[in-house]
């Protein structure tokens, strides 16, 4: 019997809808070939909806999303909406309220993709960042005092709970064990300065390590880790880190793996649902031009299929994506691919 997965689709803003359409094309092709099917339901959320109707993320939508097998997201972000509104009220609210406490971001250089790192190839750039996704400085604590006066004070607090830190670190050790890579987990923090937050992370990290004697555990300060990601990326297998550091180092990761056009991620609650997205944002200047690279969105769809437990289908999609990169694309940059957004989708489907 074929299994049906209920997938919520949030195309979102800018080029989100165009790239998500290519991912859906690939998923539909997979369902013809493998014994699976997808029941897609689209949700209209994002900047346009907010501008026209004042609606951000209705409670009822949130409730429906909780019951889905997975959520497929394009991008949230609109040039005519003040920064912080859509991000906090849609994207971060989804992460927080669905308790998607893991943000899993692979940094993999596929064959045929150029990296700006001279002399490094696919065998050197292949690691995964496990980013804590519901706490830290993203929790939004703090406030202004004497706002807009010369004596103004702005306080931005970082919230790190024992429970939140431990579940993330535990996930990272488990993931590292399952991945069968180098068997090395690196904690990225800043315990020479953040003497509370990073102290908690470091203590919990080494405590949990006791349960995983086969995994090598090491520590790096976030600034040094950025340097090593450029200099010796081959040392990394899995990196675990707090929310803000994870945000920053995965943009660097996206660049060394060939750019935002290939970087995808999953927001995961291992006990609940999960949301998959290309991490590049809404790229408003390319909207509707059939120029944006949909590979990252297709990689996000690929991660989603893998997460659903359909390993064979996921492997097939990965192979098809890699074939298109090697054989068909001139570049991964928008407008320089040598073909349009929807043609890239068709090519991937062709190899499936
Ligand atoms: C990301 C993005 C978001 C984040 C923004 C849009 C709020 O940069 O997913 O990495 O900071 O988490
Ligand atoms: Mg980011």
Image (cartoon, rainbow, N blue to C red):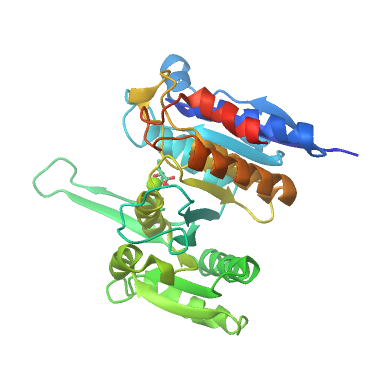
Q: Work out whether 30 lies above or below 56.
A: below
Name the quarter where the C terminus is drawn: top right
The image position of residue 102, as x and y in percent, is: 55, 56
Depth check: give the residue in front, 351 or 333.
351
Relative side of 265 to 180, left or right = left
**x 55%, y 55%: residue:** 101
Name the quarter where the N terminus is drawn: top right
Q: Work out whether 163 lies above or below 286.
A: below
Please indicate, yes or no, whether residue 64 appears anywhere in the rendered image. no
The image position of residue 295, as x and y in percent, is: 50, 37
Q: Work out whether 219 lies above or below 99.
A: below
Q: Quadrant of residue 197?
A: bottom left
Q: Residue furthest top?
A: 52
Relative side of 214 to 106, left or right = right
The image position of residue 37, as x and y in percent, is: 78, 34
The image position of residue 158, as x and y in percent, is: 37, 59
Q: Residue furthest left?
A: 150
**x 43%, y 18%: residue:** 288
């Amino acid at each position: 019997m074929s299994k049906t997965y209920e997938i919520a689709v949030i195309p979102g803003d800018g080029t989100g809808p165009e790239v998500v359409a290519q991912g859906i094309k690939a998923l539909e092709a997979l369902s013809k070939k493998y014994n699976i099917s997808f029941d897609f339901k689209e949700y209209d959320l994002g900047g346009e909806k907010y501008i026209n109707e004042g609606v951000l993320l209705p409670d009822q939508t949130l409730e429906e999303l909780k019951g889905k097998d997975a959520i497929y997201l394009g991008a949230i972000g609109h040039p005519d909406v003040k920064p912080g509104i859509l991000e906090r009220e849609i994207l971060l609210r989804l992460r927080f309220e669905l308790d998607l406490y893991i943000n899993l971001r692979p940094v993999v250089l596929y064959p045929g993709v150029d990296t700006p790192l001279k002399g490094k190839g696919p065998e050197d750039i292949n690691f995964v960042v496990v980013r804590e996704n519901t706490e830290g400085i993203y929790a939004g604590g703090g406030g202004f005092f004497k706002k807009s006066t010369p004596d103004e004070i702005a306080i931005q607090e970082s919230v790190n709970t024992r429970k939140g830190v431990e579940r993330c670190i535990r996930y990272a050790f488990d993931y590292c064990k399952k991945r069968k890579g180098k068997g090395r987990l690196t904690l990225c923090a800043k315990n020479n300065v953040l003497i509370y937050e990073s102290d908690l992370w470091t203590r919990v990290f080494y405590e949990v390590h006791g349960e995983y004697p086969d995994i090598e555990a090491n520590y790096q300060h976030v600034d040094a880790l950025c340097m090593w990601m450029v200099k010796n990326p081959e040392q990394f297998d899995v990196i675990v880190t707090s929310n803000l550091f994870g945000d920053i180092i995965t943009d660097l990761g996206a660049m060394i793996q060939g750019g935002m056009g290939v970087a995808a991620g999953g927001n995961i609650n291992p006990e609940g649902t999960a949301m998959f997205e290309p991490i590049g944002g809404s790229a408003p200047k390319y909207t509707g031009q059939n120029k944006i690279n949909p590979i990252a969105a297709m990689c996000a769809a690929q991660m989603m299929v893998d997460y659903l437990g359909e390993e064979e289908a996921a492997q097939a999609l990965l192979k098809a994506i890699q074939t298109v990169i090697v054989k068909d694309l001139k570049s991964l940059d928008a407008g320089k691919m040598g073909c349009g957004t929807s043609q890239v989708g068709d090519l991937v489907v062709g190899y499936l």
